[in-house]
Amino acid sequence: MRTIGESIQVWVVSLIGQTPESWRHLLSVNEWEKAMRFRFPADQARSAVTRGVLRTLLSRYLNRPAGDLDFNENDHGKPAIAGIEFNVSHSGDYSLLAFSHESPIGVDVEHIRDRKVIHDLARRVLTPDEYERFNSVPDADRQRVFYEIWTLKESLLKAIGSGLSVAPESLEIAFHPDKPKLLSAQTNLIKDVADWSLHGLDIGDTAYTAAITVRETHPTIQLNHF
């Protein structure tokens, strides 16, 4: 079993063929009921399996029984547990989970969907400079570029624990697939943009984009498959 140590551990979980019942024994009553409130079976599985895997990995990292872990939540619903930093995301056929010894982290994974309103959406959540760069790429690439920028922003919002209470367009990112950078942030939750590093992640499926944000300048990130 990999230990966290000084690295950031990221786990990719395939949800294909997974069933909620396989993980029910690890979930609390509230977690199970929350998963079952989803209308569609795929969403039920996504919720239950992700929570079950989260408990499994936390159990290994913290050396505590998975069923005995108690979670807290901040004002925006971000879960937390003493002794470790973590974050989760799921979309389509995948869940993404990240763990850190002490650095705040956020992750996001998104299934790239063919949205006819992609330009309207981009205009709402991108800054003027980001939108200009978005418009400068060839039409065939804009869908992916938008999702790559969006996952970076979403991972940052999750890392600072704000959710969408901080407007995505208040964050300015210099986007490059290999080396994105946070340029500015109009929120008092970020004191110095230089403290934060943003990274795109390749989960091995070109139909998805993923990203992680860490409050470290040069983190070591290890990508694992569950």
Image (spheres, rainbow, N blue to C red):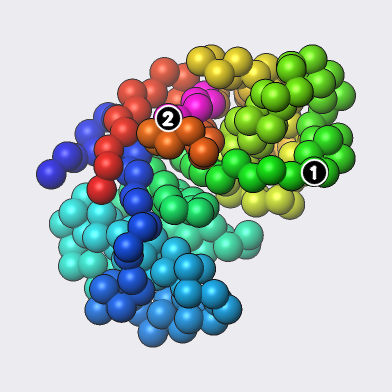
Q: Residue furthest front?
A: 140
Q: Which residues are magenta?
A: 197-202
Give the residue drawn at x 35%, y 44%.
12
Residue identified by numbered label 2 = 202
Q: Left or right of 203: which side holds 40?
A: right
Q: Which mark is residue 116?
A: 1
Q: Amino acid type of disc 1?
A: Lys
Give the residue drawn at x 50%, y 27%.
200
Return the x and y of residue 112 as percentages of the image width and height: 60, 41
Q: Element at badge 1?
A: loop
Q: Is residue 217 visible?
A: yes
217 vs 98, nearest the viewer: 98
Return the x and y of residue 162 as percentages of the image width and height: 65, 49
Residue 120 image-quadrant placement: top right
In this picture, is 139 found above or below 83? above
Residue 225 image-quadrant placement: top left
Return the x and y of residue 224 as percentages of the image width and height: 27, 38
Residue 121 colored magenta? no
Q: Amino acid type of disc 2?
A: Asp
Counting residues from the start of the chain, the first of labels 1 and 2 encountered is 1
Give the residue drawn at x 51%, y 64%.
73
162 vs 221, nearest the viewer: 221
Q: Element at badge 2?
A: loop
- Neighbourhood count class around disc 1 (C-alpha, 10 Å): few under 14, some 14–19, many 20 upward: few
